[in-house]
Image (cartoon, helix red, strand yellow):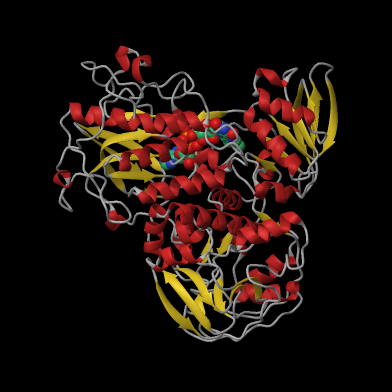
Amino acid sequence: MSGKRGNVVDPDAEADEDGSANVASVVHSGDQPGACAVQAAGARVSGWHQRLLRAKAGGGSPGEGGGRNAMRQRANGPEGPDGPGSSPRSAGSSTGSAQQTQAGRGPVLDAAQLEVLRRYGGEHDVAAGDVLFADGDVSYDLIVVLAGRVRIVERHGQPGESVIATYGPSQFLGEIGLLTGQRVFLSAVASTAGRVLRVPVGQVRVLMAQELGLSELILRTFLLRHSILTGRGSGLTLIGSRFDGGTRRLLEVLARNRLASRWLELEGSPEAEAMLRELDVPVGDLPIVIVPGGPLLRNPSSHELLDALGMSGLADTDLPGLCDLLVVGAGPGGLAAAVYGASEGMATILAEDTALGGQAGTSSRIENLLGFPAGLSGEELAARAALQAQKFGVRIKLASKAVSLSSDPGVHHVRFDDDDVITAKSVIIATGARYNRLPLDRLAEFEGVGVYYAATQMEAQACQAGPVAIVGGGNSAGQAALFLSRSGAEVHVIIRDQRLDASMSRYLIDQIERDPRITVTPRTQVTALLGKDQLEGVQLLDTSRQQTSALAVRGLFVFIGARPATGWLAGQLAQDNRGFLLTGTGIPQAQLDDTSRMPLFLETSRPGVFAVGDVRSGSVKRAATAIGEGSMAVRLVFERLQATGSAVADPPRADGTRRRADPSEATPAGSRQQVHPRLPRAKEQPS
Ligand SMILES: Cc1cc2nc3c(=O)[nH]c(=O)nc-3n(C[C@H](O)[C@H](O)[C@H](O)COP(=O)(O)OP(=O)(O)OC[C@H]3O[C@@H](n4cnc5c(N)ncnc54)[C@H](O)[C@@H]3O)c2cc1C
């Protein structure tokens, strides 16, 4: 997958709406002494920072240098001390949870599962030292070890090389980046002679769509490995100042896209300074992002960053002249709309500014989603939905911010910040809402580095189990409190009201009341942020007694509502007084673009343009609601298209098959003329 680098607007230009406020931290590396060996910054920079890390790692074999392109040469790096599926870190652990994690990260496939996989790939022998994939490779195959051992190596062939895991017979390699198309940041090296089964990535997508049991096992394993790698700070390295807006913007992109990474903070970090000297990067070029095996990026836009990782999606050459459905925003609402649209045979494009998953992607655990009694992390929801979208042939355009909408009879044009224009017969707007910020001095200084708008593993790590304060009394605040408490933190929930039950669901209140690590402080507001170079505390005002006090915390989590992401529409569509989009019968007649017909439920004031989820006026701000509305809107889109006589095509799925079961209905490849025959009308049956 290759994308285009376009002109990207300054993301701080619309600070209120584009999420520059919504920053979150990644693994924060502490100061490390670094010794530098010199290597010029070039197209591939996989070597230089690894050498610096050798001192930190306590030496270690550099392995042999030389080219490391995948699958082609011998390597004599260190043999991992562990057995199959284990890591040097966890080797010898005797705890139940460690064993479970170990089993989860390296499941052993049975004969039947191997037989299924053989149908999708081919086998070949490997020799000790063969590199099966290398950091910097654009993509990689799913590799199953049939005989012998394979090591997963970080900084392969470089000083500071370390073995992350070793896999043996009937175990498979890879993590979630294989499915998202992310550039490879680790290497796989055969420890011994053996034999492997390779499933090309295109076939993996087909397999994930067709082999349900295996697909579940692979997905769960990949997610677990990804979370372990995130905890290690593997992957990308960001160097930048906490005081710089560009650094905070990139922190958000890394966090929202759940990219394994570490941040070397410029201030007081000898390692960061040494790296910059070695690379000859002037401070004016910061922030920089180092992609293992890939380019050194200087203050990249989110599009440039995701493009360098191979994740930006549609290239300009892929843009169709006209699609049936364009969905803007890939939170739960947009993802659902895209999946339903494509599964019903519409040529569907899903465009997203920051990351698949939307707000829900930042949720540590969504517990009230039907069908998931143990809850579901936002990361898992996003990963599963993205897989579904791929399965049904949704074309995804990532790191693309919609900046304007215009319409001609029967078609709509959405322009993006990379200057691409997508023309569609119908548009579903699912751009959600952005978090409100506290009116505090020094807020920008601490956003992403002490003040957070999401509570995931990344933020929890950044707070290092120190005490934290949460502002807000809604469900998001409640979930964050429970999650952070489980991470070992002492949690203070600060609310303006006297009690939580005005705004929080009972199931969360009950858990909070039972949790000894959580304290609820009512009738209180945060009035100042305290700390010199990092957040050390907050000042509180007890509004009933008008007394101020200081509370020592490492993190302040803000969950105080949100504003709709509708600025890009420039007021063209009818809105309520808070900027949320009006739909259906809620739109005053005078504000309709076409007064001759009534808007359908979920249809905006412009025929053919729909709004779903949090961006819609009056919607219940919940993941399940957004999913429901996204799904429902597709049927309404079809009705509108039918009413206007527009055709709906039947695009192929990822596996090349088409949805229609009846061959007589099949549309010849490339033809986009046939009206879709299957969708029920509104009154016939629900979809
Ligand atoms: C921390 C947290 C925890 C939560 N927990 C729960 C829970 O447990 N249960 C529950 O039901 N709900 C929960 N919610 C609420 C739930 O996440 C939201 O209601 C839901 O995500 C709304 O979905 P959406 O698709 O409408 O919008 P969003 O999820 O906000 O997605 C909108 C997407 O549009 C993109 N976008 C915005 N503007 C543009 C543009 N101009 N161009 C392109 N893309 C754009 C954004 O980047 C974003 O990805 C939680 C929310 C948060 C923040």
Choose between 670 and 29: the one closer to the eye: 670
- Left or right of residue 224, residue 304 in this image: left
| Left or right: 574 as drawn, with respect to 33 | left
From where the camera sits, is residue 315 visible? yes
Q: Quadrant of the C terminus?
A: top left
Residue 348: x and y, percent?
A: 30, 43
Q: Quadrant of residue 642?
A: top left
Residue drawn at 26 percent across, 16 percent down: 598
Front-most of 668 and 171?
Answer: 171
Residue 295, percent from left and from top = 50, 69
Instruction: Note whether 132 is above or below 475 in the view shown.
Output: below
Rendered location of residue 160, percent (x, y): 68, 76
Q: Nearer the viewer, residue 374 or 37?
A: 374
Q: Is residue 85 above or below residue 222?
A: below
Relative to 112, say whether 166 is above or below: below
- Compared across the picture, whether 324 is left or right of 300 comes to left
The image quarter containing residue 264 is: bottom right
